[in-house]
Amino acid sequence: MKSKIKKLEGTQRQLDIEMPKEKVDEVFNQVVEDIRKKAAVPGFRQGKAPLDIILKNYREDVVDEVKKILIPQGYERALEEHKIEPLSFPEIFDIDLALSGALVFKAKVDVFPEVNVKKYKGLKVTKEKVQVADEEVEKAVSRIRDMNAEFVSIERPLNKGDFGICSVETNIDGKPIGKKNENMWIEVNKDASLLGVGEELVGLKKGDKKDVEVALPESYPDKKYAGKKAIFHIEVNDTKEKKLPEMNDELAKKTGKETVEEMKKEIRAQLLERKESNARVSMLNQIMEEFLKTCSFAVPGSMVKRQLKVLTDRVQDDLAAKGVDKETIEKHQGELKEKLEKEAENKVRLYFILDKIATAENIEVTDEEIEAWLKALAVDYNQPFENVKKYYEEHNLMGGLKEELREEKTLDLLLNEAVVTEK
């Protein structure tokens, strides 16, 4: 077998491969013989038809089968010969097979980039001092009271802070858009309600109707309505007053604590943990930014393409969840991909940088570490450990999990070795 390698743009390599006539003849004869054993040819007993008849009747099948056997063999041998570790499935093209001669074809594939990380220990990062103020705890307590509030029907007109349960129909350019919402809860508060409509409900009672005109902002998700005037036809079906619970041990028990003090202590601990987590993310982002500035190399286009699809799908799903229609999302798909392309490229570049560091530091993930992670996940989701493990195995998620944990250990190393300045 003969093969040559060509360096293409970035991390792409092209292999020009030729399988010799002798090998083609060997495989060709074997394929024809295998087909003859199974073929039903009129006028001949099964397995006894002449080879020329078999070749005449099954020529395309023979050619396809020879390719299926020889192309993978040639590709694998070329990888070994040129010591290539591929990152993607090959693109096979320019296949030339003459049954009286050699098999020639080309394969294009992405390979691991050459990564040179000059420095990854002792990187300087700043960390914002982590502390929890009493006011933050009180705000969290207020949110707990708010979540446990009761809503009581009232006979009086609506005041600020009350809620109107309304039927709402939206008209733009004299035509209704979307379905009529029969039971929309609207807080009587300019800042808390849709486009400030809530404030217009002050003084209304159950059964009252009112039209409210609002100019939609230029940033409105559905661009065809952005900047236009909308008229909300509102009918008040019910009126409710929000009653907050007393701040006492009874409320604390609803959060799983016995006393208000225990509840506040737990809230403070959770806020502190969240801030420490955010500080860690901030420091890692500083390190990643430094890597992106100082470590430049070509990244595999196939991986960038896959990462770009992941990011694009995620953003499109978020937009759909926020009510942006499919037509608008598709219209701006090209613009969205253009914005996310650099982010996708950076994510792929950072993947290889972290992999290089992990290899240099001999960072590996043990079976015990994987099992411990799965057990913690099982506890979080209140599921039997064996069920969680089985799910990861059956869905081929173990490899990805091992890679993710290896990256986490690498990030821990980077932070432990960093020079941190607190501000």
Image (cartoon, helix red, strand yellow):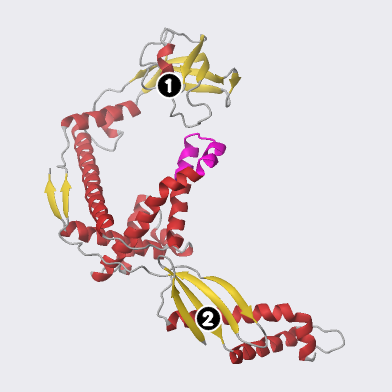
Q: Which residue is mark 2?
A: 17
* Residue 301, horizontal then vertical, whole percent: 44, 61
| Predominant SS along the magenta part | helix
Q: Is residue 401 above or below residue 39?
A: above
Q: Is 316 one of the magenta-colored residues?
A: yes
> Residue 195: which disc?
1
Give the side of residue 42 with respect to residue 126, left or right: right
State the SS at label 2: strand
Q: Residue at x 12, y 46 (%)?
A: 422
Mark 2 and mark 1: span between their CA atoms?
65 Å
Asked whether residue 47 is in view, the answer is no
Q: Quadrant of residue 408?
A: bottom left
Q: Which residues are magenta?
A: 314-333
> Residue 271: which disc?
none
* Residue 18, horizontal then vertical, whole percent: 55, 83
Q: Is residue 287 above or below residue 406?
A: above
